Amino acid sequence: MLRSALTRCRLCAYMCGNTLCRGRCCYRSNKRHRMKTNLTYLKGGVILKKRLLTFALMLILVITCFSFPSSAVNLQLPSLWREYEDYFMMGNFGQYSGNQQNYHFISSSPSNNMKLDGQIGNSNTNSLSRQNYNSVKTELDGQLASGTITQAEYDAALEAANTDVQLAANTQAMNYVQGARTLNATLPENEHKKIRGHVMVWHGGQQPMYFFCNGFVYNAQNPDWASPETMLKRLDIYIMKLTEKFA
């Protein structure tokens, strides 16, 4: 068979000598071709779904970038969160304080108020964690000097204070939660609004440097960085306190 007599199947790279084939005979006789054909259709379907989903998300983002008055909500249109509840939770930033927000979104995030610096404060020298550490250290120093505790007990207690992250009294974040609870009291359970945290720990420059230093104090000229073990313990304590506070 001459190479010039071969024709390429339209569905894959399989070469066939039948100029009238158009993929039919090789589809029937060649398993590799069937595999390639099925993969082609499968990949095409996945790509199409991804493109449709991307378009839908872009449209949603465009919609949410504009501010609408509460009275502008059109109840004849489908609710966004209901339309997509089988795929993901549709949410937005901001409080549940208007018809648009309440109608189209099932979840909301307090944004910056839930980030690390919003929850523990951003003073590198006098945060609540630093104040607590200093208070514990002063008490331990007195106990060690009087001989009521050993050096090993002192070191263990001081390290415990070194990992005891203190949450700030962030009333704005709590207002978000209370607002959702108040609204949920008027809604059936399957329509209850959710509050989602936004970047629980790391986000660009929105985590204070003292969080990474021993004693919860940051000295730019000579920072005393905490060990990985201390940091893991701090994260554990912080996340536990945060979830307990807003549960």
Image: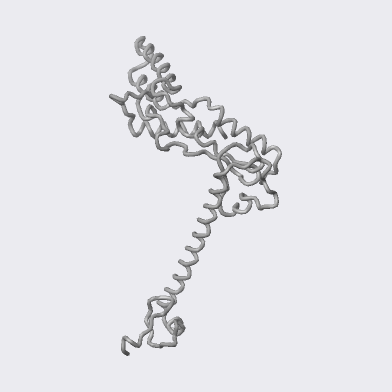
Quadrant the C terminus occupies: top right
Q: Position of residue 233 (x, y in %)?
A: 40, 32
- Residue 236's image quarter? top left
Q: Position of residue 154 (x, y in %)?
A: 36, 19
Residue at x 47% of width, y 25% of height = 166
Residue nearer the viewer, 65 or 105: 65
Residue nearer the viewer, 209 or 95: 95
- Residue 67's image quarter? top right
- The coloring applied to the image is one colour
Residue nearer the viewer, 225 or 11: 11
Quadrant the N terminus occupies: bottom left
Count of marks overlaid on the render: 0
202, above or below 20, in the image: above
247, above or below 104, in the image: above
Q: Is residue 225 left or right of residue 80?
A: left
226, above or below 145, in the image: below
Q: Position of residue 136 (x, y in %)?
A: 42, 18
82, above or below 226, in the image: below
Q: Position of residue 84 (x, y in %)?
A: 59, 53
Q: Residue furthest bottom?
A: 1
Q: Is residue 188 left or right of residue 205?
A: right
- Residue 125's image quarter? top left
Q: Residue furthest top?
A: 146
